[in-house]
Amino acid sequence: MSTETPTLTKKDFQSDQEVRWCPGCGDYAILSALQTVMPQLGLPKEKFVVISGIGCSSRLPYYIDSYGFHSIHGRAPALATGLKLARPDLQVWVATGDGDAMSIGGNHLIQVLRRNVGVKILLFNNRIYGLTKGQYSPTSEVGKRTKSTPYGSLDTPFNPLSLAIGSGATFVARSVDIYQKHLRETLLRAAEHQGTAFIEIYQNCNIFNDHAFTYMTEKGVRQDQTLYLEHGKPLVFGKEKDRGIRFSGTELEVVQLGEGVTPEDCLTWDEAAENPTLAFMMAQMLPPDMPTPIGVLRSVDHPAYDRQVVEQIESEVEAHGHGKIEDLLYSGELWKVASDGTVSDA
């Protein structure tokens, strides 16, 4: 019997479920990109699992023809961690949103990032609560008027990339729903990473927060407002490639190329730098003064938590053999509780 993995296509990863997102939602583009990338990984589709929390993004498991789990609010990272430890051979993906991950699920997200569990986290960021019909979210900008903030939000928004880097994430990237080629390339990079891969995906909610990212996605401004991070290449951007990013003291600044300033004077991007300081600074680049960086901010090779756990278990089994659950239960401090409530040593 042949054990070769059959050649799969995007269609093999499309489930028979009706896709129930609003027409025009950016989630369709993300789903399409993921379904395109999965067959390129050379694994049978039964090796994939998509786990989600609650929110529009969290419907994703229904639409991938593989294993999936629609969990409770904010807990997808915890469930994904448990699954990856039990079945390290699986490709485990997490679909979450800015509300699901940055609010009720914030602590769970931090823990999976710091542990470097080998799961792939897709954060759909539309800067709004879409499923519950348009309340402001942890990534909504200051002054955002919504149903829950009619006079404007006063909260300082989370920066998902900064949070991921600050939590010790070993792979951090950003892409955009409509940048399909870039998104697919980023998903492939994430799939190949051994530890936790975190991707923030700017995603338009055309019902409750339309045009949230047009300042950088409209064709007329895209090249001038987007900075593509390419490892080993100078940080140059603009329609005419006439602007760049360099250090001014301890800060990053935009410079105009020409009149003695060349691409060689700009910062050369290093996604593999062990020290995360520069990646954190890149995550802090915000409009309107700075272009929006997309691509891989950080990719470093650290031991994956799930692999370490497996190795630790195998080492102990090799040293001591397989144990018995009865021996474990009847070891250590034991006592008996009599029917009259008295306690004595076992």
Image (tube, grey):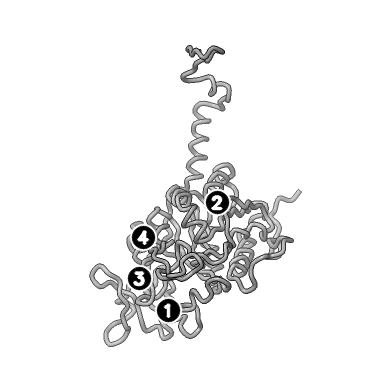
Mark 2 crowd level (few <14, some 14–19, many ≥20, 10 Å Cα): many
Residue under label 3: 268
Give the residue type that dot 3 points to: Thr
Gap in Å between the C-alphas at discs 3 and 4?
11 Å
Considering only order in the chain, which callout, 3 or 2, is on the residue closer to the N terminus?
A: 2
Considering only order in the chain, which callout, 1 or 2, is on the residue closer to the N terminus?
A: 2
Residue at left offset 58%, top offset 25%: 325
Residue under label 1: 225
Gap in Å between the C-alphas at discs 3 and 1?
19 Å
- Vertical placement of 220 versus 92: above or below? below
Residue 7 numbered tag: none
**Secondary-structure class at tag 4:** loop
Residue 37 image point, x, y percent = 60, 64
Residue at left offset 29%, top offset 82%: 261
Mark 1 crowd level (few <14, some 14–19, many ≥20, 10 Å Cα): many
Considering only order in the chain, which callout, 1 or 3, is on the residue closer to the N terminus?
A: 1
Q: Is residue 182 left or right of residue 4?
A: left
- Vertical placement of 313 versus 139: above or below? above
Find out whether the residues at labels 2 and 3 contact each other: C-beta distance under 8 Å.
no
Residue 153 image point, x, y percent = 42, 67
Gap in Å between the C-alphas at discs 2 and 3?
36 Å
Give the residue type that dot 1 points to: Gln
